[in-house]
Image (cartoon, rainbow, N blue to C red):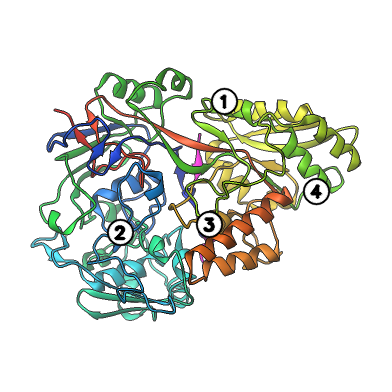
Amino acid sequence: MDMRRRPWRTTLPALGMAGMLVLAACGGGGDSSGGDGDGEPERGGTLKMVGEGDVTTMDSAFGYYTLNFQLMRGYTRQLVTSPTTDDKSKAGEMVADMATELPTKENGGISEDGKTYTFTIKKGVKWNTDPARQVTSQDMERGMKRLCNPNKPSGALSYYTTTIKGMDKFCEGFSKVEFDKGEPEPISQYIKEHDISGIKTPEKRKVKFELKQPTPDFLHILGMYFATPAPKEYLDYVPVSGTFDQHVLSNGPYEVTKYDPNSKIVMERNSAWDPETDDVRNAYVDKIVINEGVKQQPAFQQVKVGDADLMWSSPPPTSKLPSLYDDPRLELVDIGSLNPYIVINNLSTTEDSALQNKKVRKAIGLAVNKKSLAQKYGGPKIAEPACQLLPEVSKGHDPDFECPLGDDPTGNPEKAKKLLAEAGYGDGLTIEMPYREEGVHPEVSQALKASLKRAGINLKLNPVPGNDYYSNILQVSEKARNSSWDIATPGWVPDWYGLNGRTFLQPLFYSADMSKSDDTWGTNFGFYDDQKFNKLIDQATSSNDEEQAAAKFEKAQKRVVNSFKAIPVMFFKNAQLHSKRLKGFEGYPMYLGDITNMWLDQ
């Protein structure tokens, strides 16, 4: 299974953990001191990880990929972050990281109008330079400026350009800077000579953010790895380059001591890290070694027999999951993955523009046998039928949601046939769908084809390479405009938990910043366009109250679901396998496992 975590638009995206390859999710354990029954944490040893894939970069300014995030937990720190936990109810909480305290209105860290956030960086948070050096507010400012570098701007750039005052203007100018690939000077010069009006550094360890409007999820936005400070040494390298990758510095408990792309990554203790300044990371192991280029099956075998401790870039093979469900080494984490959901191409003219008819769209939803699709992913322990877009780990999820397609996970093909007849398609309907010719996707697509056939809907399947599915099919507007596809089955994972409607609903369905002539609507794959929906999102993302924002997100998702222009299919858990000696695995915030809080039973 593969989902993408990728940019919505370079100037206005908000994505979900879907922006580079995302895997599928996991859980199990206890609090950050270790999972239930794991005993007392031990220090020392080498954590061994194995898998086929690699990170996209070591640069926190760009790395929008699950594997990047797992490593960055070890060598980067942010002003605020999410705690390591196994408690789903705490997954959306934020805590101070580099900051001396979590800002609130009560302590004066957040202004009454919700538009100014003030942080003081702890004394003793240092870079692993020689000699070690205090992380400063200027480093924080520099890190934010690098997000819109002209080489490779951040995939989540819109989180910042749409919230921080003046950042859009700064980034617009930055995008016009010309440079040679190996010459960092023009980029560095722009960073030195231009400021973001909404970021102030009045003192060496104090930084202020002035926002365009109240932003109820701004702490979550600052908790992302993109919002990592950057030391002045980073100006010597082109951002997101191979040269940079060999010179990454650390303000976290581990430092990268070896990066051989597609082969090996080694991280060791950072002597500049002071545990007294870090209430989040325990850094139990001494060393972390990742062996890459190992395919899924042999990687699975190495972990199963204990030659490695953790699978790195893929979950266990789907065929092996049923035999592992009672194995304590298998972790299942409910990460709020909407995977898959059916996107309707709202520009399709197939069958006399059949998909413009709400009855036809509802018929497609009614015909889907969600139970049969779940079996292809590993059964009900992995996949749960979904009726709404926002999962249980989201504020805005409605536990009493009334599913407009009914509650039968096998569907209702007879009712679907009736609706098709009422819409003028009593003799059936033929529509097309691209699918990824890898992993379980061929089987899932065949199962979907079979379930739709029960209602008289012929699904023509078009195989495409997995790497092309998003970038060369769903995000290419010409494909949608020419009706080369009618429905699709992407997946989506949120960038954070709690108040995260922005990370689902804005990138997937928001259109207020789009025009009919735009070449692409980014991750709004189906060209969903509803002004009332847009207004609800605007109200939610500019609210000064979390509960009011959640209520707006809830109303917004219902507009989409009740239109049948996107059909939720299932919420998916991630499966992760570890060795018997690995302890302290917890599913949040990093469902592949927090390398800073696991230990080895030696």
The circle on residue 501 is 3
Is residue 345 shown above or below 25? below
Q: Which residues are magenta?
A: 1-13
Membership of 10 in magenta stretch: yes
Q: Is residue 88 left or right of residue 502?
A: left
> Can residue 349 be seen from the camera position used here?
no
> Looking at the picture, which amino acid does disc 4 mark?
Lys
Q: CA distance from mark 2 to mark 4?
A: 45 Å
Q: Secondary structure at mark 3?
A: helix
The one of 394 and 225 positioned closer to us in this rendering? 394
Is residue 536 shown above or below 108? above
Q: On the image, numbered disc 1 is attached to which residue?
A: 376
- The label nearer to you, 1 versus 2, is 2
The one of 308 and 232 positioned closer to us in this rendering? 308
Q: CA distance from mark 3 to mark 1?
A: 28 Å
Membership of 460 in magenta stretch: no
> Can residue 305 be seen from the camera position used here?
yes
Quadrant hosting residue 45: top left
How crowded pointer 2 is (Cα within 10 Å; few <14, some 14-19, many 20+) is rated as some
> Looking at the picture, which amino acid does disc 3 mark?
Gly
